Image: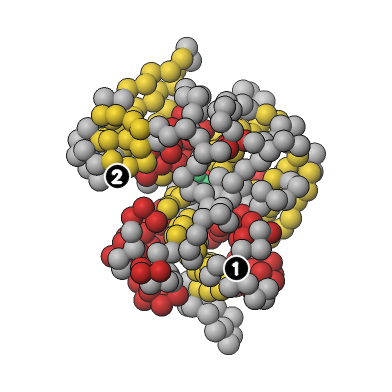
Amino acid sequence: MQPHTNDAPLDGNAAGGLLSELFAFDVTTASVICEGCETQGEVAQARVYGGTMGALLRCAHCDTVMIRLVHTPHGFWLDMRGARSFFVKPPAE
Amino acid sequence: MIRNGSDSAVPRRLQWQTAEVSGLIDETPRVRSLVLTLPDWPGHKPGQHVDIRLTGEDGYRAQRSYSIASAPESENVMLTVERIEDGEVSPYLSIDVRKGDKFELRGPIGGHFVWTSALQGPLFLIAGGSGVAPLMAMLRHRAAAKNKAPATLLYSSRAFEDIIYRTELERLAAMGDGLKIVHTLTRQQPAGWAGGARRIDRAMLESEGFPPAARPRIFICGPTRLVESASQIMLDLGHEANLIKTERFGPTGG
Ligand SMILES: Cc1cc2nc3c(=O)[nH]c(=O)nc-3n(C[C@H](O)[C@H](O)[C@H](O)COP(=O)(O)OP(=O)(O)OC[C@H]3O[C@@H](n4cnc5c(N)ncnc54)[C@H](O)[C@@H]3O)c2cc1C
Ligand SMILES: [Zn+2]
């Protein structure tokens, strides 16, 4: 994950390290349904916009902000309004 | 050593650990590979990356992602870093870094942009510049696993001397195990150059790749612009979206 702001987005996959600070499983391989267009896809296929204090994950189809993660000196803000639901598979053996 | 890492049924929390540089390899005038010694490495899958964190004397921190270029079968973890002029982190990792230097690292990260030899079907790898790093992990793994399914690497570099892993790629292609390597040089070609001489485009992707009916697994990695155009062309050519995996490195590279 890049901590600085980039105009060009990265793949959701790039946020794996940052998301692992909050989730016990690999969120990037979970599927997520976008609240904006109802498309289902892997979090890794979303677009990541990174900033020093966190990341925005936008739907690759309609640009809806699905996940907003903000790192403050005291903790994290996690806003997932744009993500309707997640489907998490148990890790493969 | 028990290698359960990302396959473990009990998820393993990523922790920052201290990596020590145990070897350096000059790959091209602008690219260097770092061999790392890590106190706690659970193993990785080809295509995964790590996050690196550098902390200055004043406490200022910079964090960047780098792909793992080594195969899981390899003893060490290797990263390959291209120098970006005016970059905050890559000039240190590609030029100033010395054997014995230490920095913080967490990984392996990511289960999406991953290929293992257990996956069936042809493999089509598309790289621009240092985007070849995670694809090299796949090719090294493919060779170690003695996988003979057809595979093609289409690799764009600026000039001949910018081709990363050039001699190793020649060696892999000469093994006769179904691997084909196609180079294209976008800025400058040596006299008598028989490879491509332009950016990766639709004609190249169509003629060098596999037909959609063969259902190749497609991995595209490199500068954002290249990844976006190549993945769109593969979709237009009729490849299934779920067989196309991308890793954008940012605006960087060749
Ligand atoms: C998942 C992932 C894996 C990666 N793997 C590798 C790898 O294996 N090898 C490798 O060399 N790189 C890799 N990268 C890119 C790497 O993370 C850094 O972006 C790169 O090294 C540049 O960092 P920097 O600090 O030197 O430059 P920065 O300080 O971030 O930027 C340097 C200058 O270039 C401009 N700029 C900003 N971002 C970029 C950019 N990305 N490219 C070009 N110009 C930019 C800026 O305006 C700035 O002036 C990967 C990125 C991701 C997301
Ligand atoms: Zn959407």
Amino acid on which the number 1 mark rests in the picture = Lys
The residue lying furthest to the front in this view is: A93
Which residue position is annotated with label 1? B148
**Residue at (39, 56) in percent of width and height:** B243
Residue B202 seen: yes
**Residue at image point 56% right, 43% down:** B49
Q: Is mark 2 within 8 Å of ligand 2?
A: yes
Q: Residues within 10 Å of mark 2 (few under 14, many from 20)?
A: some
* Residue A50 makes an appearance in the image: no
Residue B198 location, x and y as percent? 44, 74
For marks 1 and 2, give the CA distance.
34 Å
> Which chain contains the residue that carries disc 1?
B
Residue closer to the observer: B45 or B202:
B45
The label on residue A60 is 2
Give x and y (percent) for residue B249. 48, 49
Relative to B119, does residue B109 appear above or below in the rendering? above
On the image, which quarter does residue B8 sit in?
top right
Q: Residue at x 56, y 31 (%)?
A: B9
Q: Tell me what residue is drawn at x 53 percent, y 80 percent.
A: B195
Q: Nearer the viewer, mark 1 or mark 2?
A: 1
**Where does residue B234 sit, x and y in percent of width and height?**
35, 64
Give residue B57's quadrant in the image.
Answer: top right
